[in-house]
Image (cartoon, rainbow, N blue to C red):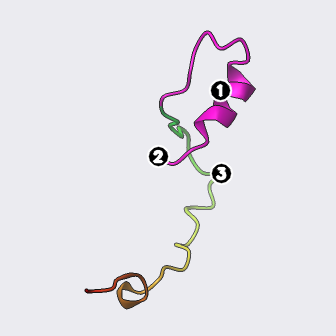
Amino acid sequence: MSGFDQSGVDREFFPEAEQSALLVVNIGSSAGTGPRPRGPRLAYDEIHRSL
């Protein structure tokens, strides 16, 4: 998962600083309820500006 708090993960899981997190990967499956619906997204014209 990109964009994770690497220093926070390192503090929580590697307090002795012998190792460091490089990447977080979620592995598993849902509880049988299926995936959650996609959250709201901004429209292209709300995030893009041409100069």
Give the secondary structure at mark 3. loop
The Cα–Cα distance between marks 1 and 3, rounded to whole angstroms, is 28 Å
Q: Residue at x 64, y 33 (%)?
A: 7
Give the secondary structure at mark 2. loop
Q: Earlier in the sequence, mark 2 or mark 3?
A: 2
Q: Which residue is mark 2?
A: 2
- In front of the other: label 2 or label 3? 2
Circle 1: residue type: Asp
Judging depth in this view, the residue of 6 and 36 nearest the camera is 6
The Cα–Cα distance between marks 2 and 3, rounded to whole angstroms, is 24 Å
The Cα–Cα distance between marks 1 and 2, rounded to whole angstroms, is 15 Å
Q: Looking at the magenta stretch, what is its main secondary structure?
A: loop
Up/down of 18 relative to 47, above or below: above
Q: Which residue is mark 1?
A: 10
Where residue 16 appears, as percent x and y from the top left, is 71, 11
Q: Is residue 20 magenta?
A: yes
Give the secondary structure at mark 1. helix
Judging depth in this view, the residue of 29 and 27 nearest the camera is 27
Circle 2: residue type: Ser
Q: Quadrant of the C terminus?
A: bottom left
Mark 1–mark 3 contact, CB under 8 Å? no
- In front of the other: label 1 or label 3? 1
Q: Residue at x 54, y 80 (%)?
A: 40
Residues in magenta, as a range: 1-22
Q: Which residue is mark 3?
A: 31
